[in-house]
Image (spheres, grey):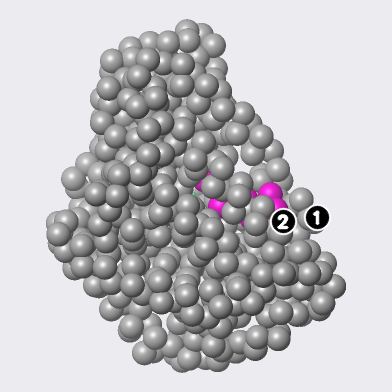
Amino acid sequence: MENNRESWGSKLGFIMAAAGSAVGLGNIWKFPFTAGNNGGGAFVLIYLIFVIFIGFSVMLTEFAVGRRKNLAAVGAYKSVDSRWTFAGVLGVLSGFLIMGFYPVVGGWALAYVFKVFGGLLTDPAAIGDVFGGFITNPVQPLIWMVAYLLLNVVIVVRGVSSGIEKAGKVLMPLLFGILILITIKGLTLPNAMAGVEFLFKPDFSKVTGAVVLAALGQAFFSLSLGMGCMITYGSYLNKQENLASNAAIVTAMDTAVALLAGLAMFPAMFSFGMEPAAGPGLVFVVVPSLFAEMGGLGVVFAALFFVALTVAALTSSVSLLEVVVAYLMDERKFTRVKSVITASTIMALMCVLASLSLGGVGPKLFGTGAFDVFDLLTDKIFLAIGGMLLCIFAGWRLDKEDLRKEITNEGDIAFGIFEFWYALVKYVIPVTIAIVAVSGIKSGFDSGVGAIMVIGVAIIAIFAAISKKL
Ligand code: TRP
């Protein structure tokens, strides 16, 4: 078993792949507009607290469980107790749902590489309308979505170490560099400090249950947690690696990129007089507007930005696809190629619904379109509850000494805060997530999405009830 399982080519390969999974649209596209929608500073602070105390611990738990069991998410749960299979299958469902909208946005990023060269920057006043017109178009974004999804298929068909690892290695420095450039440019604009203040000065009067749940969901989404992704990646990791330091490095890199993305967007936005709650168009409007002032060089930088964004998105979405593929291969005995084709076909159909919903076309659930339903179910319910279930599983169902051995590599390396981590995982995190979820769902009813969240909880309950059949 151990010998024929694919594994990472090198230490750097694993960190780059795990960081590649974490750093993606969640950091650069989602974080800024979610922070904007949720009032700025206080949201950011709560998000950071969740990242440090919950995100890091859950990531370490995912790595440890995956490597200990040497199995992807579903298999890892099932090998211990078939009543827990549902927690793994819930992750596979999350994988489908996130991949039901992520490639739509990935397609936008890809399209923007070409739009930038097609003269997008020549009429700065129209940049906002161009975005709105593009994403609500019934056909154009679908073509880009399919192109983007095909890139995922090609990478995942080629398997773990050759495909994902290589893609992960090239991008990080480029992305980081351009974000720094955008930040410097943004900070030199008039009224830039208002943006910095918005992002970092907490105003606690804006905090509601919904804001806290959004911060928790953002932490899970951004760190690729709560759906078995890091369990699966951990299962490909060799026994010599230090799990805790890997988790710390990945968490730090992911958070740095999110904060940098915020810092790159908000000063420019405030300077341009845009609304902080500008929504999903934020990066696609702010970045081109910012570079429009720089002439020909601006075109090159803007194009490079969208290339880097596309690659960052790719290294994330391949990890999502990989979870589903690993499930189909390990549990359903599909070949890799058949798994990839089956999974990506279903995802493509979901993406069609998601993309059309932005133009107001297609089915709605309680007045909410497919794009938002997929996002809401995963970001607000499934990921956090998935993380909670993992912690309950690790804390109450696995052997404490086994976990200690796994994290310390059978006693070879020290992990000084083991007891602290274990207490977080066993008690603090499950209770915290339960409280945040309940208060978030309550305030979800104020904005008309409570019913969808309750459906999400019901789906989990049904999965739990039929766990042994999954
Ligand atoms: N973290 C990625 C991003 O920020 C998205 C992602 C990849 C993800 N794998 C995941 C989110 C697993 C949740 C679970 O774009």
Answer with left or right where residue 210 lies relative to residue 46: left
Residue at image point 49% right, 40% down = 259
* Residue 157 drawn above or below residue 390: above
Answer with left or right where residue 323 lies relative to residue 355: right
* Residue 423 percent across, percent down from the top left: 56, 78
Name which residue type carries label 1. Ser
Residue lying furthest right: 412
Name which residue type carries label 2. Phe
Residue at image point 81% right, 78% down = 410
Residue at image point 46% right, 59% down = 50
Q: Quadrant of the N terminus?
A: bottom right
What residue is shown with label 1?
10
* Residue 222 drawn above or below residue 183: below
Mark number displayed over residue 388: none
Query: Is residue 373 part of the magenta span, yes or no?
Result: no
Residue at image point 62% right, 67% down = 60
* Residue 86 percent across, percent down from the top left: 45, 82
* Residue 175 percent across, percent down from the top left: 59, 34
Residue lying furthest top: 295
Answer with left or right where residue 470 lies relative to residue 41: right
The segment highlighted magenta reads 14-24
> Does residue 85 show up?
no
What residue is shown with label 2?
14
Q: Quick check: marks 1 and 2 in contact, CB under 8 Å?
A: yes
